[in-house]
Amino acid sequence: MKRFLGFVKKEFLHIFRDYRTLFILFGIPVAQILIFGYAVSTDIKNAGVAFLDLSKDEVTQKLTDKIISSGFFKKTETLLNYNDIDMVFKKGKTKAVIVFEEDFGKKLINQGKASLSIIADGSEPNTATLITNYTTAIVNDFTMDLAGPVSNNSLRINPEVKMRYNPALKSHFMFVPGVITLILILICALMTSVTITREKEFGTMEVLLVSPLRPIQIILGKVMPYFILSFINVLLILALSWLVFGLPVKGSLILLLAECMLYILMSLTLGILISTVSSNMQQAIFISLVGLMLPTILLSGFIFPIENMPKIYDYVSSILPPRYFIVIIKNIMIKGTGLMYIWKETLILIVMTLIFIGLSVRNFKIRLE
Amino acid sequence: MIKAIESSGIAKSFGPTKALDDITFSVNESEIFGFIGPDGAGKTTLFRIITTLLLPDKGNMKVLGMDATSDYKELRKNIGYMPGRFSLYQDLSVEENLNFYATVFGTTVKENYDLISDIYSHIEPFRKRLAGKLSGGMKQKLALSCALIHKPRLLVLDEPTTGVDAVSRSEFWDMLSKLHQHNITIIVSTPYMDEAIRCDRVALIQNGKILSVDTPQNIRAGFSRKLFTVKSVEKYKLIKTLRKNPEVLTAYPFGDSIHVTLINDASDNFLLGYLVSEGISDAVIQEAKAGIEDRFLELMEKGIKA
Amino acid sequence: MNKKVIYVKNLVKKFGSFVANDNLSFEVSAGEIFGFLGANGAGKTTTLRILSGLSKPTSGEVNVAGFDAYRQTEQIKKNIGYMCQKFSLYEDLTVKENIVLYGGIYGMSKSLIRERLIDLLAKIHFQEYENRMISDLPLGLRQKLAFSVAVLHEPKIVFLDEPTGGVDPITRRQFWETIYETASRGITVFVTTHYMDEAEYCDRISIMNNGKIVALDTPEKLKKQYNATTIEEVFIKIARP
């Protein structure tokens, strides 16, 4: 046991002494969260909005003024008919078009309800969501004012939201689960494979092999520090996305952390497997980056929805662990579902972990050949 | 007497290249045994078989009375190994490296300090310095301390003096001689012939084969001919001229002179006259004692002719 | 033998307050084999860089192959060759491709390269290897070829770094013969090494310690002066007084 602890201590010294490792470990996750977070900044200012007023009455005029004077929006154009909508989007300055139906004011006063449509440019999903949310809020506020302090809900404006170009808005807050998925596999697999191959390259592995350390002690000693650090990383990312962007975990936090541990373990064993097949650091880095990071970004559903991929990519992605973890973490964090809905994915990850452990132990050599 | 190493008929190939071919030798307990041979001779492969890191294709390797293949676990506890590239963690300090190796071998620096004190005292003033920032000589001393920290019965040093300056090299050999009194068997490899003299016995190794095993004195005495050194300012002309003469068997540059052997050992009187007649008037001829390198060369040539 | 191809007088090279080369003065003649010795960190590399036009002196006079080390570094580079033990040739190119490549780098004409190629292949019996990959050649051959490539453009000076470390005794002899032959053609051979038995082959050697040249003479005279049988002993006596 003392031997093992001595080994773990040495690994920690390596990590803390190399600012590059530390940067990859903690700098990249923080940077990624902040970058992705900035891209979906909740702060919209002067977003371009065009109006298509088919009613042109006092009420629509008031509502238009209220929307523009809110400070969030800037009127770009006044449209005359539906055909202009596409054209105005293509110009690029307009992020949304607000359409008042015919006789909007009359309907609102006579029937107590009227509809307006918010058509947003879905190719920028985050902006689109924000714009529609803000507009809806302004419209609700407006109806309340109009109805007076004693609201009897007799007046209702139905804001009907339509998305152009990306109707389902797939990437809503997807970046946090995506970053966790990517960072964990990157750190765990890359770092462990690199630290093991580094010992091979510098000749220290020869001495370790000749020492009474058992292979399993070497493997665990390598894995342990990264397991702990990766777990801290998960907590850091979750805390950061909650504090800075207010993204809560809807489901069980304990379940989420347990699933993260499983995924970390899987990635670590994968890293060891990579190290057993590569003879130097360059190879290990290459396999980790090309073999893991790119497929994770491109094929796991992190950025591009799997449903939209050609069948062949679907099959390829089905052997990628991140694909399943993304489903798990999305379900827990965003939908708030429990183990009931994700047991299948969890089971697949467990099986994969066991396979990787088996292969690593079989491949880890007690000699140099 | 118990043998520290007994190797019989060891062979090892990597693909089509034969790295080792029928290697048979034995090393006595507590002797310094040197493997002398150029790069690519098979020294490292042999050392890896001795340290249980590689399995031989053929043959039997007994180390400290144990079989290097089947008893590898027990054997590994008793070997101190210093691979060709100093196996140090460059990002750990001197002290941290030493402590790490001590823990890995289940001991402490304190426990075996007497064994390494002679060596470690040279680098102790720098114990907080990172190993990567040490000079070649200091790295070598640290690596040796690390290999010794668990009091091994057999110390295996693969080219410990490569890339180290002359002063450190000579200090290093002094340290090895001192380790003698601790009853540690030492095997050491080197491409530098002049280091043979510091070993009790040496094996000359070339192309995966052992050419000769003996004490350095006997190896030098094994040189089969009279050896002459010939000096002149114009070395290139001297070599050419010597080789032209049918009485000259070999003429090789050796440091500041040319080493010459003759077909007929007895009659070297003609040589000076011949050189003068060829326009080399400053030649100085002396009889000399053959060195390890002379003998190595002779054995290599025999091998090529055979 | 009297033409000076390297002329160094009161050379000083400082890095900040650190004096790497402290007032060096020496001369090397055409066709001389000059050994430049010193422990790691003695300042050898610094001097070598200045002599090969890669770095400029802080003060002092340095002239290499007739060119000034302050202003004419490009001309210096054209007139020197360089070979080190570790890197020499591209392993994944053939013998011929390597030669053509180096010839091209030194701006030799195609016909001249072909002429030298045939010459060289004939001289060191490389004909059969012309189209072989360097990685397929035995170590000894590689080293000889590397040297031939380093002098392909007939430089005035060739710098060698530990040229025969770790090679077998026969190859070593052959290599030194090639060096002697090259020197007899008037090319200066400048050898740096920390293996003292390599130094014994040189015509003259200098030993550096702490940025200063502390000994400079023929191996024989140095051995006599320090009452030693080998240069290694001389070196140890100088470095550990």
Image (spheres, grey):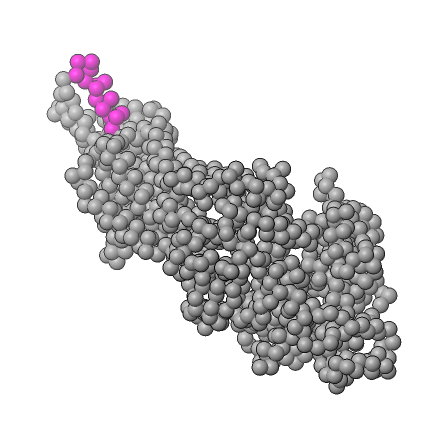
The residue positioned 45% from the left and 73% from the top of the image is B16
Left or right, A284 with reference to C219: left
Q: Which quadrant is the C terminus of chain A positioned in?
A: bottom left
Q: Which quadrant is the N terminus of chain A positioned in?
A: top left
In the picture as drawn, the residue positioned furthest to the left comes out as: A111
In the picture as drawn, the residue positioned furthest to the front comes out as: B1
Chief secondary structure of the magenta portion: helix
Q: Camera-side residue: A221 or B206?
A: B206
Residue B118 in percent (x, y) is at: 62, 43
Can residue A101 be seen here? The reply is: yes
Can residue A241 be seen here? The reply is: no
Quadrant hosting residue C146: bottom right
Residue C183 in percent (x, y) is at: 76, 70
- Up the image or down, C193 lies above or below B233; here it is above
In the picture as drawn, the residue positioned furthest to the bottom comes out as: B246
Left or right, A34 with reference to C133: left
Residue A267 in percent (x, y) is at: 33, 46
The residue positioned 84% from the left and 74% from the top of the image is B283
Q: Camera-side residue: B10 or C94?
A: B10
The residue positioned 26% from the left and 49% from the top of the image is A354
The residue positioned 22% from the left and 32% from the top of the image is A251
- Up the image or down, B297 lies above or below A80; here it is below
Region of the chain picked out in magenta, as a range: A136-151
- Up the image or down, C69 lies above or below B114; here it is below
Left or right, B44 with reference to B221: left
Tag count? 0
Residue A193 in percent (x, y) is at: 40, 49
In the picture as drawn, the residue positioned furthest to the top comes out as: A149
Q: Camera-side residue: B213 or B283?
A: B213
> Is residue B98 located in the magenta-colored stretch of the structure?
no
